Amino acid sequence: MIDFTLGTQVSTRIRLARNLEGYPFPSHLKDERKAKEIIRQVSAALNRLDEFSLYYMDDISPSLAGLLKENHLISPALIKNQRISAALINGEESVSIMINEEDHLREQCIVKGFDLSLAYETMSEIDSKIASSIKFVYDEQFGYLTACPTNIGTGLRASVMLFLPAITINGEMDKVINSVSRLGLTVRGLYGEGSEAEGYMYQISNEVTLGVTEEEILSEVQSVTEKLTELEASERYKLLNGENALDIKDKCLRSYGILTNCAKISIEELVKLCANIKLGACLGYLNISEVSAIDDLVIKMRPTNIDRATGSALTQVEMDKYRAEYAGKKLKSLIIL
């Protein structure tokens, strides 16, 4: 029996925006000495809780910065602020604290699958630990004060990464975006604001942080995620039984055939083919042991991840060749005969 919800809920992220008393927001933080003070204070507070690696953005290579960005551990804005910014990342790479991005702190926890409670509890514990030794800017009427007005209040962004191929293919995504926006939520691409929804990946998150509690935000995101999962399942059933079912099956199987037999491939084409292969697994056309491994494969095949894995800066041709060989072998190993 086909599980039409398979692979839909990819990951969950909780992000908290915080600022320290006595310091200007990063956009006005011209004194590098004060920026380093913030980094030292946060690092000292965190390392009493867990082992975190500290990365000064002006002291790491562009390759490592790109790797951290590709793995969703830091943002492009943090890299842009490299003169004053840093990141603290735990050993499991599930928690990262971006320092002096848009706010003094952007604390985030990412977990695989759909688990808002786990992600929030993890992040809340860390946030409380930092707050026990560092005073945040807080107003009794408005809540946490932030650089961007849309984050004032709880400072909480709860988001879920969803794989929504059937909704997209069936032309229902515009309706979804409009419906979600009316509920105070937003739909973004794989890498957040301003990014495209490549590989049928969409990030659903709350837009409102002022005048609502953390519990209300989590409940709303939970409810919308569950409804979108149900809608995607319904649309997948239509794909499987619709008049274009053979075309969909052919696209999925053809994508697997290309990716397991090609000699070179770009990251753009790999993303598209992997999305089709994952859809094929979700519709029962391909018997894949671990569908989430396809999501991991796409990240590993991005340029800076390949450079770090090989230990060298490959040419474009060498990278495309490596990507084809690695991805082909990995996909073959996932198939259950």
Image: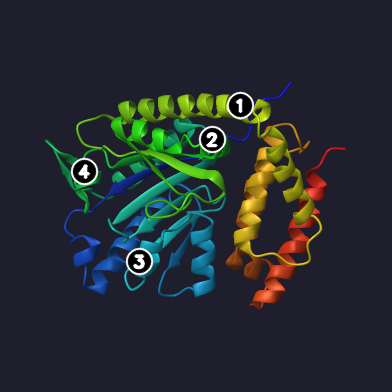
Q: CA distance from mark 1 to mark 3?
A: 48 Å
- The residue sitting at the left extreme is 141
Residue position marked by numbered label 2 in the rendering = 170
Of the numbered discs 1 and 3, the one sitting upstream in the chain is 3
Q: Residue at x 33, y 73 (%)?
A: 83
Residue position marked by numbered label 4 in the rendering = 152
- Binning the other alpha carbons within 10 Å of mark 2 as few (below 14), some (14 to 19) or many (20 upward) gives few
- Binning the other alpha carbons within 10 Å of mark 1 as few (below 14), some (14 to 19) or many (20 upward) gives some
Tag 2–tag 1 contact (CB < 8 Å): yes
Tag 1–tag 3 contact (CB < 8 Å): no
| Quarter that holds the N terminus | top right
Residue position marked by numbered label 1 in the rendering = 238
Q: CA distance from mark 2 to mark 1?
A: 9 Å
- The residue sitting at the right extreme is 337
Of the numbered discs 2 and 3, the one sitting upstream in the chain is 3
Q: Amino acid at mark 3?
A: Ser
Q: Position of residue 158 (x, y in %)?
A: 39, 38
Task: Give the quadrant of residue 280.
Answer: top right
Q: Residue at x 48, y 73 (%)?
A: 60
Q: Amino acid at mark 2?
A: Asn
- Tell me the mark number nearer the camera, choosing from 4 and 1: 1
For the residue labelled by badge 1, is the local secondary structure a helix, a strand or a loop? helix
> In the depicted view, which residue is nearer to us: 270 or 161?
270
- Tell me the mark number nearer the camera, choosing from 4 and 3: 4
- The residue sitting at the top extreme is 1
- Tell me the mark number nearer the camera, choosing from 1 and 3: 1
Q: Residue 150, can we see it?
A: yes
Q: Position of residue 80 (x, y in %)?
A: 36, 69
Residue position marked by numbered label 3 in the rendering = 85
From what the image shows, is residue 97 above or below residue 127? below
